[in-house]
Image (cartoon, rainbow, N blue to C red):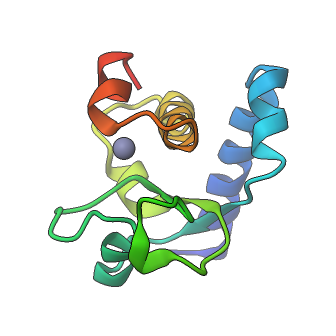
Amino acid sequence: MSRKRKQNFDSLVQRVLLELPVEVCSRLEEVPIVVSGQPTAKMLEDCGRAGVQTAYGLVYGLAIHRPAIGVPMHIRLFRKPILRHPKRDKLKVIRDILLHELGHLYGLTCSELLAYGV
Ligand SMILES: [Zn+2]
């Protein structure tokens, strides 16, 4: 993927962050967001998602993810799966993924978050 496409993706993430409510942004100030191409098997394993086909985002550093203990808390977004997401509105896709991963920081499970629509 070209440098320009990576920069375009980063600017989409920036736009999403600027449009999030202030309360959400203040929590994100404590949790860095890192963009990667796509998840590796190790990343999935570290976040308790071993064996899943792919992921759009992961949150690192939660106490329940014992293998990742020692890794500083952060949210990782995966550019390639997000760009392949069937929804065309990538701003909404990125926003929903960020809200989903943030929800994990508040102790909500995947199924609870999916029930809320993120
Ligand atoms: Zn989840």
Residue 72 on image: x %, y %: 67, 72
**Location of residue 61 by image quarter:** bottom right
Near-viewer residue (37 or 1): 37
Where residue 58 appears, x then y in whole percent? 46, 57
Q: Quadrant of the C terminus?
A: top left
Classify residue 53 as left or right of residue 7: left
Q: Compared to 61, does 56 lie above or below?
A: above
The residue depicted at 57 percent of the width and 36 percent of the height is: 106
Give the residue furthest to the top: 116
Residue 15 vs residue 30, the one in the foreground: 30
Please tell me which residue is depicted at 41% across the width and 72% down the height of the picture. Answer: 66
Residue shown at 81% from the left, 51% from the top: 30
Answer with the quadrant where ligand 1 appears in the image: top left
Q: Is residue 14 left or right of residue 73?
A: right
Looking at the picture, does residue 87 appear above or below residue 105?
above
Q: How many marks?
A: 0
Instruction: Report x, y in % for residue 67.
Output: 40, 79
In the displayed structure, does residue 67 sit left or right of residue 14? left
Residue displayed at 60% across by 65% down: 35
Residue 81 falls in image quadrant: bottom left
